[in-house]
Image (cartoon, rainbow, N blue to C red):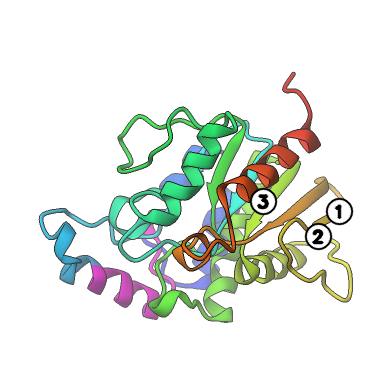
């Protein structure tokens, strides 16, 4: 099955009766021509350091514990990270920073994430993104985010997390837009992004969801000290406090 437009995406996402089914559907998507062209171009031209590797060059599904109570949401796969490896936040320095923090705080089985078959497992956490393809200049359009929205909406329905850790202002706005379109009651005016910001939103049938803002784990933030390991650890520990002990 190949998905070639927004209507296909909506139908396929709604029909997914499990996370496994959803994660199988996502990589078949070709609904956004600009993203398809870019992800495949990157996969063909490659970065010199990865010239001997076969790039994934497809949409990237979420990854982690199917019973996760915490969802970590970025923006989109990195061109030479997840677009290469096929797993969210895997194979680049942003992922190195994120998974090292998850390991320190007890959510990840190891501190590194290099390939999708490296043995890494997550406990009580799943990582995902509002946009599943690597976009040019790391900047998806609003239409591309909207087309991809049903995947995240169905993921939320299937996982039913209590807390979402949102990495970065762009991801924050993209997530709030997707949630509003899917029936979540988002406050007006919309809450502004900030590191450590907490916002509770509700849904008529899905209950409540606490959003936690966190500066993105990009090198732009981590190399400059805008986001330190201690700051990320604190957000993850706050998420743990909010969900409470696992029964």
Q: Position of residue 36 (x, y in %)?
A: 34, 72
Q: Quadrant of the N terminus?
A: bottom left
Label tally: 3
Residue at the far top: name it: 247
239 with respect to 115 (left or right): right
Of discs 3 and 2, which sits in the foreground? 3
* Residue underneath mark 1: 202
Q: Position of residue 119 (x, y in %)?
A: 35, 29
- Tag 1 or tag 2, which sits nearer the N-term? 2
Q: CA distance from mark 3 to mark 2?
A: 17 Å
Q: Position of residue 158 (x, y in %)?
A: 64, 41
- Is the residue marked by circle 2 packed among few (<14), some (14-19), or many (20+) residues within 10 Å? many
* Residue underneath mark 2: 184
Residues marked 2 and 1 touching at CB (< 8 Å):
yes
> What is the magenta range?
26-42
* Residue underneath mark 3: 165
Q: Position of residue 144 (x, y in %)?
A: 52, 75
């Amino acid at each position: 099955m190949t998905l070639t437009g927004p209507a296909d995406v909506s139908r396929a996402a709604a029909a997914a009766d499990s996370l496994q089914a959803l994660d199988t559907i996502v990589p078949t998507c070709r609904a956004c021509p600009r993203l398809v062209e870019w992800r495949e171009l990157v996969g063909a031209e490659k970065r010199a350091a990865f010239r001997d590797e076969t790039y994934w060059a497809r949409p990237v599904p979420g990854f982690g514990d199917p019973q996760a109570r915490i969802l970590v949401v970025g923006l989109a796969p990195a061109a030479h990270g997840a677009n290469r490896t096929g797993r969210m936040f895997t194979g680049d320095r942003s992922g190195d920073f994120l998974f090292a923090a998850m390991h320190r705080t007890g959510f990840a089985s190891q501190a590194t994430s290099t390939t999708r078959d490296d043995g890494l497992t997550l406990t009580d956490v799943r990582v995902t993104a509002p946009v599943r393809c690597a976009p040019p200049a790391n900047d998806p359009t609003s239409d591309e985010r909207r087309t991809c929205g049903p995947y995240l909406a169905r993921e939320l329905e299937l996982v039913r997390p209590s807390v979402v850790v949102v990495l970065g202002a762009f991801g924050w706005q993209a997530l709030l837009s997707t949630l509003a379109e899917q029936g979540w009651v988002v406050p007006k005016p919309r809450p502004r992004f900030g590191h450590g910001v907490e916002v509770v939103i509700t849904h008529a049938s899905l209950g409540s969801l606490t959003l936690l803002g966190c500066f993105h784990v990009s090198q732009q933030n981590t190399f400059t000290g805008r986001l330190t390991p201690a700051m990320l650890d604190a957000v993850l520990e706050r998420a743990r406090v909010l969900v409470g002990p696992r029964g």
